[in-house]
Image (spheres, rainbow, N blue to C red):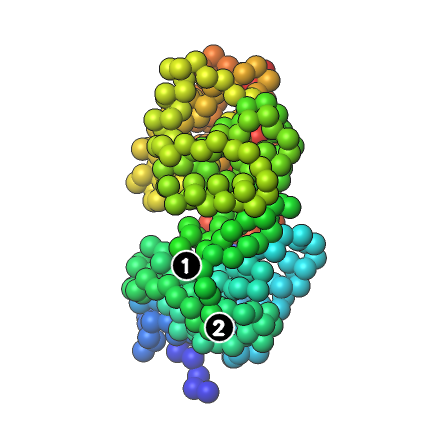
Amino acid sequence: MPEAHQILISKRGARRLRAGHVWIYQSDIEDLSDASSGEVVKVVTQHKSGGSNSLGMAFYSADSQISLRLITRSDIELDKDFFKSRIQDALQFRSRLNISDSAYRVVYSEADRLPGLIIDRYGDVVVLQTQCAGSERLKSTWIDIVSELLKPRAIIEKNSTPARRLEGLEELSGVLTGSLDGPFEIIQGGLRMMVDPLAGQKTGAYLDQRENHRAAAAFACGHCLDTFCYQGGFGLSFARAGAENVTLVDQSEQALEVAKENARLNDLAIETHHANAFDFLKEQQIAGATYQVVVLDPPAFAKNRKAIQRAARGYKEINLRAMRLLEKGGVLITSSCSYHMSSEHFEAILLEAARDTGRTLQIIQRRGQSRDHPELLGVPESAYLKCYILRVL
């Protein structure tokens, strides 16, 4: 195997790696050598004596602003056995979590030291996402390893994410191995749920909220409202926990049809509304409706730093309207999956909304993504989901 190309990075970039991060941006690349996009390269920095120091091995991307994604801080050859050992380590960690659900994340990209690679398991079906040039180049390797370790009946590629465009990669979705004949059933939080990786959001379901659905169910009572409900993860958990009435709201008719099917599978009663959540909340406020529990689980409002101000206005509006709908003692479960919206900023928005409504709220829990989506210390980008459970006093 030929020796890996070397890429020289700036002292600033080297400090970033040594501080614990694993990304190097284009602005810190000083010499590319002859590296090609997607290649595994050796990362070096200039030594005071004129020589170079190795900082490890990384995926190189010619198109992305994130030029290097560090895989290991050792100067070693990265072969199939190396990557297999990383996936085995990720699997062993998930097995220690004693996950009772049949769908969960097996590999979470940089957090599992496999940059740009997502592996989600839905029973005997596995879904892959290769989100950077390096992980894309090794797609056949991932297929071989997953086939050997998990023996799935099908491996699906769900690479229809905007992140791939930033890497100069086309968006792709399809069956890589085996066969898939449409939606199939999984178990989530004791609920039977239908999933379709090729047609659904993300890799088929919002696995990052999996444990939050369960935590929220502890507060189920009276009339519960689940907005931006998708296929009913929160709302169905309330219905199963004995809520008197559960209303699901989403602007996707297709998602609501799946939610209805999920309710039928579990013999649960729900009410659905095909509507824009902003409009629905406003209409409910005008009508004088009240709820014991309201869930807000919107898509990311801030896709980049430039969108934070506009996103803040959106988050404030929906949380303000939700607070006005809650009865005394009612519970608000509100989330943001915008990485660029920090926890501190989101909490400040919640406080501002509470002040504007004249309400006082307790923070019952601060939560994040499920434990199968661990955060890599030193890489704040790996922690994006914020979920607050609040009670109106």
- Which residue bears the numbered disc 1? 198
Residue appearing at x 41%, y 32% in the figure: 273
Q: In this view, does 245 lie to the left or right of 248?
A: right
Front residue of this view, candidates 358 and 332:
332
Question: Would you say residue 162 is visible in this rendering?
Answer: yes
Image spot of residue 129 (x, y percent): 44, 62
Residue under circle 2? 178
Residue 355, x across and y down, in percent: 46, 16
Q: How far apart are marks 1 and 2 (CA)?
A: 14 Å
- Give the amino acid at mark 2: Gly
Numbered tag placed on residue 39 in the rendering: none
Tell me the quadrant of the picture where the C terminus can be found. top right
Q: Is residue 337 left or right of residue 269?
A: left
Whether residue 380 can be seen here: no
Q: Which residue of the protein is positioned furthest toward the bottom in this rendering? A: 1
Residue drawn at point x = 55 percent, y = 60 percent: 121
Towards the viewer: 377 or 17? 377
Figure quadrant of residue 361:
top right
**Disc 1 + disc 2, Cβ < 8 Å:** no
Count residues near mark 1 (Cα–Cα under 10 Å), then give few for <14, some for 14-19, many for 20+.
many
Q: Quadrant of residue 337?
A: top left
Q: Name above or below for residue 5 compared with residue 150.
A: below
Residue 225 vertical position relative to residue 10 in the rendered view, above or below: above
User: In the image, residue 46 lies at what x, y percent?
Assistant: 41, 69
Q: What residue type is labelled 1?
A: Leu
